[in-house]
Amino acid sequence: MKIFDVHTDILFDLYSKKLTGDENRFDYHVNQLLSSKIKGGVWTMYSETDFDLIEALNLALGEIEMAKLPDFKVILGLEGLRNLKSVEDIDLIYQLGFRHAMLTWNEENRYATGVKGDITRGLTAEGIKLIRRMETLDMIIDVAHLNEKSFFECLALTNKNIIFSHGNVKSVCSHRRNLSDEQLRALKAADGLFGLTLAGNFVSPNKEEQDVEHLLRHFDYAVNIMGIDNVVFGFDFMDYLSEFPNSNLVDVPDATYSYRIIEGLKMRGCREEDIKKVCWDNFYNRYQNKIHTF
């Protein structure tokens, strides 16, 4: 049994560590992934602050040595487009091999509004143009981090290649990054994929409940609305991000413990074919044509 992790900030980690002079950061991720059930991932450039996006992407890509991860599948992605200078620049990103993007992190930017932004502000005119261009390029449009107004406006524009890569269920844990039942139903109507995440405070506000058992309560709830074919995992491991120490589940603190997700699903009585769907097939079977060739 293998897992496709639809959200990890590896590109940002490679970029930021390269700036500090770390020439071997890729090995940190190689060692973990080789010892894990994760055999594919959407590797993203996280953009919380301002920097030159094209420069950052090239620096990160230059650190990758895929010969160290034989048969591992990677889709290149962007967590937030605050640093995309113009809609036209998405074509430059595409030419670098990127096939996935979120319009925002939590902030308001020139394209859309994240969950920290004004609840009455949604997509901008530039954001609508950007979504249309991403549609034309057949890119994955990731609605994670959008506020509700931007989320629903995006789904009103398109139902092509829609995913929500990492978050959980608001009815189980009322975190601003989790989705309401109405959002889950809209995502299902768009035939989008819903990625459950290991961010502890998205699972429960209580530290003692930030574990696999309580994550899988979100799984049960999500499957009840979305169906087994539209649920995936976007782990968002933060063990390598110094600003978010100890932020994942207590029993899955990094990639090497990903087997515990599979164990938990088995203990919950999930059929093997359904575990295979949510861990790999639901995402990979749709988007294997976007795997990057290094």
Image: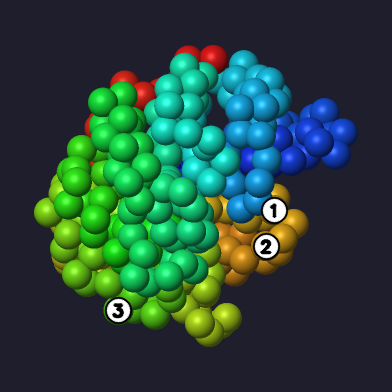
Point 62% across, 66% down: residue: 247
> Would you say residue 165 is visible in this rendering?
no
User: Mark 2 and mark 1: span between their CA atoms?
Assistant: 6 Å
Residue contact between numbered discs 2 and 3, judged by CB atoms under 8 Å: no
Quarter of the image for the C terminus: give it: top right
Location of the N terminus by quadrant is top left
Would you name the residue on which mark 2 appears?
244
Residue 127 x/y as whole percent: 36, 45
Give the vertical position of 153 relative to 59 (above or below). Answer: below
How many marks the image carries: the answer is 3
Above or below for 10 versus 106? above
Q: Which mark is residue 287?
A: none
Residue 171 is tagged as 3
Q: Residue furthest front?
A: 125
Marks 2 and 3, the one that precedes in the sequence: 3
Viewer-proximal residue among 86 and 179: 86
* Residue type of the residue flagged with mark 1: Leu
> Three-letter amino acid code at disc 2?
Phe
Could you tell me which secondary element the residue under label 1 belongs to?
loop
Q: Which residue is drawn at the image coordinates 49% and 21% (left, top)? A: 92
Marks 3 and 1, how far apart at CA: 28 Å
Q: Which residue is mark 1?
A: 241
Q: Position of residue 23 (x, y in %)?
A: 82, 28
Q: Position of residue 172 (x, y in %)?
A: 34, 78
Residue 26 location (% of width, % of height) = 71, 31
Residue 185 visible in the picture: yes
Q: Are marks 2 and 1 in contact (CB under 8 Å)?
A: yes
Disc 2 from disc 3: Cα separation: 25 Å
